[in-house]
C-alpha cells in the first residue's frame, strides 16, 4: 500500500512538474513589446514556430509518460494485453464462446469497474448500475467505444485507456485526475 501511495505521489509530482513547466514556457514566451514599437513579422513567425515546437515536445513527453505508466501496469500485473493502433490495450480474460462481435451502431450493456492505474476504484456498475449505450454514438469515453469493437457479447475484458481517449487534460472533475490513463474492467451482455 505504501508503494502504491508512493507511485501515486510520484505521478502527481510529474503532473505538477509539467504544469509548472507549461506556465514557465508561457511566461517566457510572452510578448512585452510596447504597442508603439514596430513589430518585425519575421521574428514573430519564428517565435510562433518555437512555441509550437515546445508544445509539441511537451505533448510528446506527456504521451510517453502515459505509455510508460501503462507498460509498468502490464509488467507488474503480468497480463497479456494486446495494444491497438489507437493506444488502447485490451485483455479478454473470459472469452464468450457464442457471442456476436460488437460493431458500431449496436446497442450493448456493460457491467464495469473503472480504476486508476494504482488500483483506486473510481466508478462501478455495482455502485451506479450497468451502462447501456449504442456503440460509437453515446456520451461515454471514446476509448470504450473503440475498445469494445475488439470484443464479443459475453466477453469479460480489461482495457487500459490513455487519457486522450478517456478524460483528457482535465480529468472528469470528480474522481479521475487530469491526464490519467484508466483501467476499465467490463463484462458485455
Image: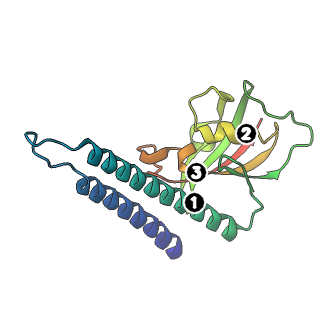
Please tell me which of labels 1 and 3 falls first in the chain: 1
How far apart in space, not on screen, are marks 2 and 1 (Cα)? 20 Å
Crowding at mark 3 (Cα within 10 Å: few <14, some 14-19, many 20+): many
The circle on residue 162 is 3
Give the SS element for disc 3. loop
Classify the position of the C terminus by image quarter: top right
Q: Mark 1 points at which residue?
A: 117
Q: Which of marks 1 and 3 is in front?
A: 3
Give the SS element for disc 2. helix
The circle on residue 148 is 2
Residue 94 pos. (x, y %): 83, 51
Residue 75 pos. (x, y %): 69, 69
Marks 2 and 1 in Cβ contact (< 8 Å): no
How far apart in space, not on screen, are marks 2 and 3 (Cα)? 15 Å
Horizontal placement of 106 versus 169: left or right?
right
Q: Which of 166 and 28 is in front in this view?
A: 28
Amino acid at each position: 500500500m505504501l508503494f502504491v501511495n508512493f507511485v501515486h505521489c510520484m505521478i502527481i509530482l510529474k503532473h505538477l512538474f509539467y504544469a509548472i513547466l507549461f506556465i514557465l514556457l508561457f511566461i517566457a514566451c510572452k510578448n512585452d513589446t510596447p504597442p508603439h514599437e514596430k513589430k518585425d513579422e519575421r521574428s514573430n513567425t519564428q517565435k510562433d514556430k518555437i512555441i509550437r515546437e515546445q508544445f509539441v515536445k511537451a505533448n510528446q513527453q506527456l504521451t510517453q509518460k502515459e505509455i510508460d505508466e501503462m507498460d509498468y501496469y502490464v509488467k507488474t500485473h503480468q497480463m497479456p494485453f494486446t495494444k491497438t493502433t489507437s493506444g488502447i490495450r485490451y485483455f479478454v480474460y473470459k472469452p464468450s464462446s457464442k457471442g456476436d462481435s460488437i460493431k458500431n451502431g449496436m446497442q450493448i450493456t456493460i457491467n464495469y469497474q473503472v480504476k486508476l492505474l494504482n488500483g483506486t476504484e473510481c466508478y462501478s456498475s455495482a455502485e451506479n448500475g450497468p451502462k447501456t449505450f449504442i456503440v460509437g454514438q453515446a456520451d461515454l469515453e471514446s476509448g470504450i467505444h473503440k475498445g469494445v469493437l475488439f470484443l464479443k457479447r459475453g466477453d469479460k475484458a480489461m482495457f487500459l485507456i490513455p487519457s486522450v481517449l478517456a478524460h483528457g487534460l482535465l480529468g472528469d472533475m470528480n474522481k479521475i485526475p487530469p491526464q490519467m490513463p484508466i483501467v476499465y474492467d467490463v463484462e458485455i451482455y
